[in-house]
Image (spheres, rainbow, N blue to C red):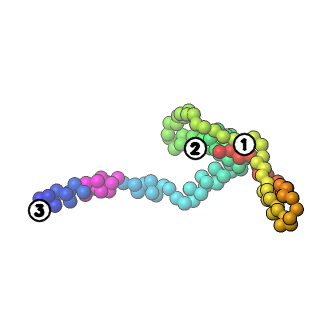
Amino acid sequence: MVVALLTTLLAATPALAVDEVDTKRLRDAVTVNGILAHERVFQRIANQNGGTRASGTPGYDASAAYVQRRLEAAGYEVSAQEFTFPFYQELTRRCWSRSRRRRPSTSPAPMTSPAPATSPARCSPPTTS
């Protein structure tokens, strides 16, 4: 009986600690309209910077500046930490074509290597990741 009571008390302790945190002000401050307003700003930044806000791009810098301004307006002291990371950017368009091999003839003629039939090349714009 003592072991069961002790187990129940120990198991309930973490749950009690979570329940003591009052998040009402945070929950009241975060609204769907507020989230959507920030998302619209980030999308506008992406649209003005080649469709991206990826690290290492001007879109990232503009996004970081927006977040910094918002935090400072809310009374936070903001500092930036530099870090290194692998960066990849395509500088040319990607092009590809689909190659199909023609079936060899079933006639008894001498075997030759069939010529490939190539569809038109398709290209996509360079990407940043």
Q: CA distance from mark 3 to mark 1?
A: 68 Å
Does residue 69 appear in the picture of this structure?
A: no
Q: Nearer the viewer, residue 59 or 97?
A: 97
Mark 2 or 1: in front is 1
User: Which residue is label 2 attached to?
Assistant: 67
Tell me whether the residue at label 3 lies in contact with that at label 1, contact meaning CB atoms closer than 8 angstroms.
no
Q: Are marks 3 and 2 in contact (CB under 8 Å)?
A: no
At label 2, the amino acid type is Val
Residue 72 spot, x, y in % from top left: 54, 40
Select label 3 or label 2 by which is in front.
Answer: 3
- Compare marks 2 and 1 and give the one earlier in the sequence: 2
Q: Residue at x 63, y 50 (%)?
A: 42
Task: Judge by depth and name the residue closer to the eye, 73 or 129.
Answer: 129
Write the residue at 78% across / 57% down: 98
Q: Between residues 61 and 120, which one lies in front from this camera angle?
A: 120
Judging from the image, what secondary structure is the residue with disc 1 in?
loop
Figure label count: 3
Whichever of labels 3 and 2 marks the residue nearer the N terminus, that label is: 3
- Location of mark 3 (residue): 1
The stretch drawn in magenta includes residue 75 = no
- Expressed as whole percent of the image width and height from the top left, the position of residue 73 reads 55, 42
CA–CA distance between discs 3 and 2?
56 Å
Query: As displayed, is residue 53 above or below residue 97?
Result: above
Residue type pointed to by label 1: Glu
Highlighted magenta segment, given as a residue range: 12-21
In the picture, the quarter occupied by the C terminus is top right
The crowd level at tag 2 (other Cα within 10 Å; few <14, some 14-19, many 20+) is some
Residue annotated with mark 1: 90
11 left or right of 40 in image: left
Question: Mark 3, residues whose alpha carbon is within 10 Å: few (<14), some, or many (≥20)?
Answer: few
Direction from residue 100 to residue 63 in the image, left or right = left
